[in-house]
Image: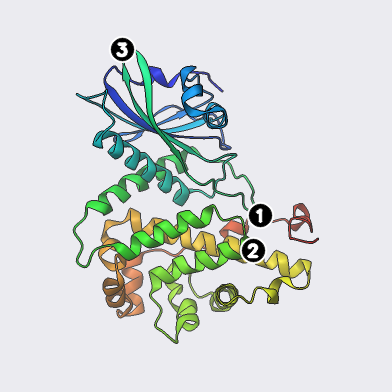
């Protein structure tokens, strides 16, 4: 780990925003530009002492313990004012962070902190601070290492989110952005059944199932993303429905290790399908007009299966998140046994 100062990355009169987090990485992250207007800084950092008083001891410790910064900056004519420039910088690094969530199933040791301010007279002036709910560790792979390629992918997705916001699409993009937000919220949910339920709802948001045919179409329409895994997706939908209708006792009333392990595997699978599908839509502007809203989705799903697949592209393997699954490392206590 290095111990550089973020101050070295700014010129006088620059405004900045960055997300600070403590996350497991594959190797030491190389600091530098990862996309137009976006930088990443890796290592342990020296922050100005006066920030501790401004942030408070707990938040300061979170920032100081971070080993990864997602950053954006720009030269400003009004560095002394907290204004729309700071808001825009915070927005783009927030999109970078969401892009990172969609490129990797990482978890952090504390809430990622977002900060904004400016550099004036050789000093970093912190003007605004907030945080994101921390993404929770998964049970099958608790803290997978964040890869350099995933950071780069997250930056690209972040920029595409910004472009999507500005794109002109008939009937707007509310449904797609609701799906993205729901996925982000779910990554921070500590309950595995709630997560399975909400990830399945993310998929519902992309497939627009007809009333009375939701399970049937959850099985058939997900062929677009993963091929024909009808039995698996039907079982996942059954759990989603049980959570929706307050019937989780069917799965939790009696402790059965194999049944609990099966729930973990299903949660990992549905998360992967939701994440890779949402990321695919965001990264490919040709898909935006098909997935932006209910009207466009209805038109897309009225196409033939072959037409839809040509538009969508290659499928992913839903078993990918189970590649390192080993039940020996999952205790009964982790599965909720009292």
Residue on which the image places disc 3: 121
Label 2: few (<14), some (14–19) or many (≥20) C-alpha neighbours in 10 Å: some
| Res. 265 mark | 2
Q: Find numbered disc 3 in the image and state the secondary structure of the residue it sits on.
A: loop
Residue pictured at 45% horizontal, 40% vertical: 151
Give how far apart the Cα atoms at labels 3 and 2 are. 54 Å
Label 1: few (<14), some (14–19) or many (≥20) C-alpha neighbours in 10 Å: many
Residue contact at pointers 3 and 1, CB within 8 angstroms: no
Give how far apart the Cα atoms at labels 2 and 1 are. 8 Å
Percent x, y for residue 86?
30, 34
Instruction: Tell me, yes or no, if residue 33 can be seen here.
Output: no
Residue pictured at 54% horizontal, 24% vertical: 44
Residue on which the image places disc 1: 140
Percent x, y for residue 134?
54, 45
* Residue 234 figure quarter: bottom right
Label 3: few (<14), some (14–19) or many (≥20) C-alpha neighbours in 10 Å: few
Relative to 109, does residue 338 appear above or below in the rendering?
below
If you read the primary sequence from the N terminus, does the residue marked by circle 3 or circle 1 appear first? 3
| Res. 325 mark | none
Residue pictured at 34% horizontal, 53% vertical: 283
Q: Find numbered disc 2 in the image and state the secondary structure of the residue it sits on.
A: helix
Q: Quadrant of the C terminus?
A: bottom right
Q: Quadrant of the N terminus?
A: top right
Percent x, y for residue 68?
49, 32
If you read the primary sequence from the N terminus, does the residue marked by circle 2 or circle 1 appear first? 1
């Amino acid at each position: 780990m290095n111990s550089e100062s973020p101050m070295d990355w700014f010129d006088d009169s620059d405004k900045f925003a960055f997300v600070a987090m403590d996350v497991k990485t594959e190797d030491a992250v190389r600091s530098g530009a990862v996309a137009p207007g976006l930088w990443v800084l890796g290592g342990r950092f020296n922050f100005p002492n006066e920030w501790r008083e401004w942030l408070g001891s707990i938040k300061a410790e979170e920032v100081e313990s971070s080993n990864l910064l997602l950053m954006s900056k720009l030269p400003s004519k009004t560095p002394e004012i907290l204004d729309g420039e700071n808001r825009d910088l915070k927005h783009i690094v927030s999109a970078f962070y969401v892009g990172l969530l969609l490129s990797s199933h990482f978890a952090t040791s504390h809430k990622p902190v977002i900060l904004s301010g400016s550099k004036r007279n050789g000093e970093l002036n912190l003007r605004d601070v907030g945080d994101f709910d921390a993404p929770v560790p998964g049970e099958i792979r608790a803290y997978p290492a964040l890869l350099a390629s995933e950071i780069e992918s997250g930056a690209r997705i972040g920029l595409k989110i910004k472009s999507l916001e500005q794109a002109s699409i008939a009937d707007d993009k509310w449904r797609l952005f609701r799906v993205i937000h729901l996925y982000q919220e779910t990554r921070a949910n500590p309950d595995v059944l709630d997560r399975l339920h909400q990830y399945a709802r993310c998929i519902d948001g992309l497939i627009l199932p007809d009333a009375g045919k939701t399970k049937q179409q959850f099985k058939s329409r997900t062929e677009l993303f993963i091929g024909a895994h009808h039995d698996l997706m039907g079982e996942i939908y059954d759990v989603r429905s049980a959570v929706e209708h307050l019937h989780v006792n069917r799965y939790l009333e009696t402790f059965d290790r194999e049944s609990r392990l099966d729930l973990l595997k299903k949660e990992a699978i549905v998360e992967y399908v939701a994440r890779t599908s949402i990321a695919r839509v965001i990264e490919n502007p040709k898909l935006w007009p098909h997935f932006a809203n209910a009207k466009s989705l209805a038109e897309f799903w009225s196409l033939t299966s072959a037409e839809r697949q040509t538009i969508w592209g290659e499928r992913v393997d839903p078993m990918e998140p189970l590649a390192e699954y080993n039940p020996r490392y999952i205790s009964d206590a982790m599965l909720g046994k009292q």
